[in-house]
Image: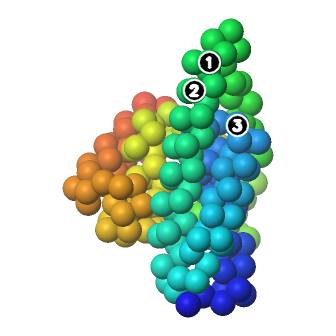
Amino acid sequence: MATEQELSDFLKSVEKRAFKRSIYHVRDEEAALDIVQDSMMKLAQHYGDKPAAELPMLFQRILANTTLDWFRRRKTRNALFSNMSEFSASGEDGDFDLLETLESLSNSEGTESAQDATERAQILHEIELEIKELPDRQREAFLMRYWEEMDVAETAAAMGCSEGSVKTHCSRAVHALSKALSAKGIKL
């Protein structure tokens, strides 16, 4: 059973990554913030008594379901008010760096030149742009497996699909990213 402190620490540890993941899905900063807050509230209200080890998988599933609910509400709202303009994708803000953890790890010694830092920042920006272009399920699987560092079984449970589907989505995402980055002359 998770203590209040464990729950609080868990939520603090995932809030930034969850927000960035939501931004990739809904492409609207305010909506992404609402989704993450709703997901955190649901976890605390309904699953706060679960063991701390179960919280990451539960939260990922709640976040995925809350995001799907947002899309359903948006679709319904658009159908009811067909004259409403489509929501803008103003959430694409250059302030967010998907791979900031990787960036900080790769420069932990502080020996990087300004030119190297600039090139690395450009490459990371290109990777982030290409991740945004992946189909939803591929992006979701890719982010859970390689960014959230969830294993195949956890990702499958969180996405509500088979482990084979997760592997397929990840393989296709990696292939698409590799192809897109190679076309831009970026070799990793």
Q: Residue at point 63% right, 25% down?
A: 77
Secondary structure under badge 1?
helix
- Relative to residue 92, is residue 162 drawn left or right? left
Cβ atoms under marks 2 and 1 closer than 8 Å? yes
The label on residue 76 is: 2
Q: Residues within 10 Å of mark 3 (few under 14, many from 20)?
A: some
Task: Determine the image quadrant of residue 113.
Answer: bottom right
Residue annotated with mark 1: 80
Give the image quarter of residue 25. Answer: top right
In the image, 31 versus 173, the foreground residue is: 31
Q: Image height check: is 78 above or below 175?
A: above
Mark 2 residue crowding within 10 angstroms, few (<14) / some (14–19) / many (20+): few
What x and y, as percent, mark residue 163? Answer: 26, 60
Visible residue check, residue 101 = no
Q: Nearer the viewer, mark 3 or mark 1?
A: 1
**Which element type, helix, strand or loop, lies under badge 3?**
loop
Residue 176 shown left or right of residue 94 in the figure = left
Q: Which mark is residue 145?
A: none
Q: Residue at x 72, y 87 (%)?
A: 5
**Disc 3 to disc 2, C-alpha distance:** 18 Å
Q: Residues within 10 Å of mark 1 (few under 14, many from 20)?
A: few
Which residue corresponds to mark 3? 28
Label 2, secondary structure: give it. Answer: helix
> Mark 1 belongs to which amino acid?
Leu
Query: On the rendered structure, is 58 left or right of 125?
Result: left
